[in-house]
Amino acid sequence: MVYTVETEIPAQLREQVGATFKQIGQVASTLPESTALWRSLSDSVLQLELGGYRFWYRVDRRDNIIVVVHIDDLERPNAA
């Protein structure tokens, strides 16, 4: 997993997020490359809400990574 944004999230939450993205990556790796779902995934920004934060991410099949592109603190609506 790669973060392209800086954020201050609790260490325990960072571990949970990492474990969740690892599971997402494991499931995604079982999908055949020829499936239409991969075209959709590669063109989309997805969301994961966990621990009061929303993580916006992309699945990069070519580099075999999940890239977090934005994080919202849901308890502070005006925070970036």
Image (cartoon, rainbow, N blue to C red):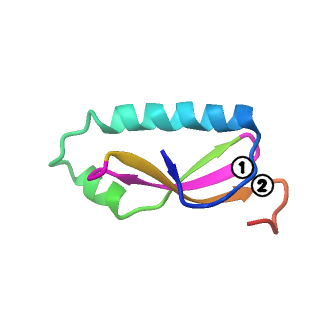
| Of 50 and 65, the residue lying toward us | 65
**Picture residue at 26% right of the left edge, 58% below the top:** 39
Q: Residues within 10 Å of mark 2 (few under 14, many from 20)?
A: some
Q: Label 2's element?
A: loop
> Sequence order check: which comes first, mark 1 or mark 2?
1
Q: Is residue 59 magenta?
A: yes
Which amino acid, mark 1?
Tyr
Residue beneath disc 2:
74
Quarter placement of the C terminus: bottom right
Cα separation, mark 1 vs mark 2, equals 5 Å
**Picture residue at 73% right of the left edge, 36% below the top:** 11
Q: Which residues are magenta?
A: 51-63
Residue beneath disc 1:
53
Q: Residue furthest right?
A: 76
How far across and how far down the image is residue 24, in percent? 44, 37
How far across and how far down the image is residue 43, in percent? 35, 64
The correct choice, above or below, for 70 with respect to 63 in the image is below
How far across and how far down the image is residue 69, in percent? 54, 61
Which amino acid, mark 2?
Leu
**Picture residue at 70% right of the left edge, 59% below the top:** 72
